Amino acid sequence: MAFDGIITMAVVHELKSKITMGKIDKIYQPESDELVFNIHTRNGNLKLYASVNPSASRVHLIDSSLPNPPAPLPFCMLLRKHVQGARITGISQNGSERIIEISLETLNELGFTVSKKLIFEIMGKHSNIVLVDISTGKIIDSIKHVSIDVNRVRQLLPGIIYQYPPRQDKIPFRDMISMDFAQEPAHLLNNQSQHNAKSLQRAIGGISSAFAEEMSFHDNPVEFLSHTVSGIENDSISPVVYMDDKGFPVEYHITPLSDYEGSCGKKAFDTLSRCLEYYYDHKRSSSRLYQKATDLARSVSAQLDKHRLKEQRLREDLLKAENSENLRLYGELLTANIHQVRPGEKNVTVINYYDGSSISIPLDPRFSPAKNAQQYFKRYGKAKTAVKEKQLQLESNEADIKYLESVLSYVENAEAPGEIEALRRELEDTGYLRKRKVPGGFKEKNIKAEPIRYILPGGFVVLVGKNNKENDILTFKTASSKDLWFHTKDIPGSHVILKLSGTLHPDPDDPFNESAIYAAASIAAYHSKGRSSENVPVDYVPVKYVKKPAGAKPGMVIFTSNRTVWVNPEIPEKK
């Protein structure tokens, strides 16, 4: 990832032109390591996003809307107190470093104007966001506290004088532009005759390995560097994202990178912020969706492992309980031959009157023969009761497994962070995950059910649930009794409704709606665990034949009068 000093310079240049003199209207903190500032400018409202996630630290404008948690985190509340309503008076980069400073003017409690500064340090695992009082130079607070136990050289704690990170023994790229590259000291470049990427990166501060590699392809690297910086200042950059054969981003920059031009697909953008937003939203290892999905999938998988282990133990116990007929036989034979048993014996051999064979019965020498017979009858009774109990427990456990498998399939197929949040809330409500604590005075926001909507060529509307709770609403509240209900056969997946009432343009050439049925079945196969398979079986039935058993878990239903079609997973364009 190439958020280097060059990218920082380009971001600062873009922010200067768009949010300088803007007013910070709102501040919220979607996650513990990210902030969103709603800024009112002359050209409309803009959203400034900042993240200190080690794998995705950055600052840029965003177009999308991120969820606002019901309970603000402490640093968010502090920023609302100190800088909400503040005017942005300046934006700058600290030298050639990955540090962005936003100067602010606001009013204090007494109505006097005070100056503060938000400092964004974009430095991988050392990234931070610091609020500084300009008059004293002291830190008001930071999103991550760095104590002396963590860093002996530089601490970031409230009340400490803010100091910039120590400079590296490199020439900043801004200073390098004004130098004669051919006369640089040999110790900086290792080999003056070969301007390779490693020597360039060791010599020049503020450039990434990808940009250093691109510089090495040019006969005059400093001229290329100067041309890039000039492009930033003159608004003539070309932000581009390079993607692998699966469509996932692998690199980005404000200038074409020769290493990726021939081997990767690319997508150009009109602004750097849109380029950064696309890159980080679609890069699996750093996107919010991937991180949230991975965390939730890990929790669900752990629950599944517990229930599968429980199933194995229940089946073992059930097998033992079912093989308990010998206990009843021992009790009967002891009762019939009680006169042959001597007190204190450890076993007795008697004739089995069912088949005439001899059978040895173990005895507890502490008890009388009659007591031993009673013990065998008692153990037999417990075993028969255990069979019923274990079967009930096994059925309940199997329902848990089916439910968790369905949730896991939704996690794997999720397309937005909001879907993951809805699934987490569902698991909390059903007791599989511990509910997160919400500070007093705040309430969890209700997540509105919004099923995925498709329009088929014949004008039919298809609705798809994104989680189990949404499935229940879709099937039992949204759909009419004459609509068709679809679900993959014995495969976890979404409830899919084909609306037969109120179609946009019914097709007179297809009176039985066969094409719509196959299209809806393909959609159901796509929104299931069988998405990557072929010839997926899909059951369909009128909604009136779908019932929800009393006490069943969300999304769990029974149905009759169904038919089955085999289709390949496929979806039309979303509407």
Image (cartoon, helix red, strand yellow):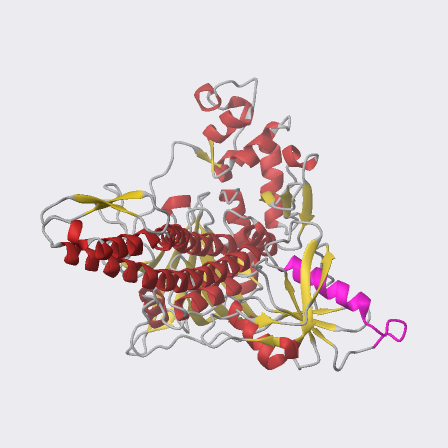
Residue 44 in view (yes/no): no
Point out residue 90 in the picture as x, y percentages from the top left corner. Answer: 46, 60
Q: Quadrant of the C terminus?
A: bottom right
Point out residue 133 in the picture as x, y percentages from the top left corner. Answer: 31, 61
Nearest the viewer among 88 and 113 is: 88
Point out residue 113 in the picture as x, y percentages from the top left corner. Answer: 35, 72
Nearest the viewer among 23 and 371 is: 371
Query: Which region of the structure is painted magenta?
Result: 506-527
Residue 574 in view (yes/no): yes
Q: Residue at x 71, y 52 (%)?
A: 535
Point out residue 159 in the picture as x, y percentages from the top left corner. Answer: 23, 58
Residue 523 drawn in magenta: yes
Q: Is residue 478 left or right of residue 5?
A: right
Q: Is residue 274 left or right of residue 166?
A: right
Residue 154 drawn in magenta: no
- How many badges with numbers are in the image? 0
Height in image: 220 above or below 323? above
Taking the view exactly as shown, the residue that stands out farthest to the right is 509
Height in image: 280 above or below 192? below
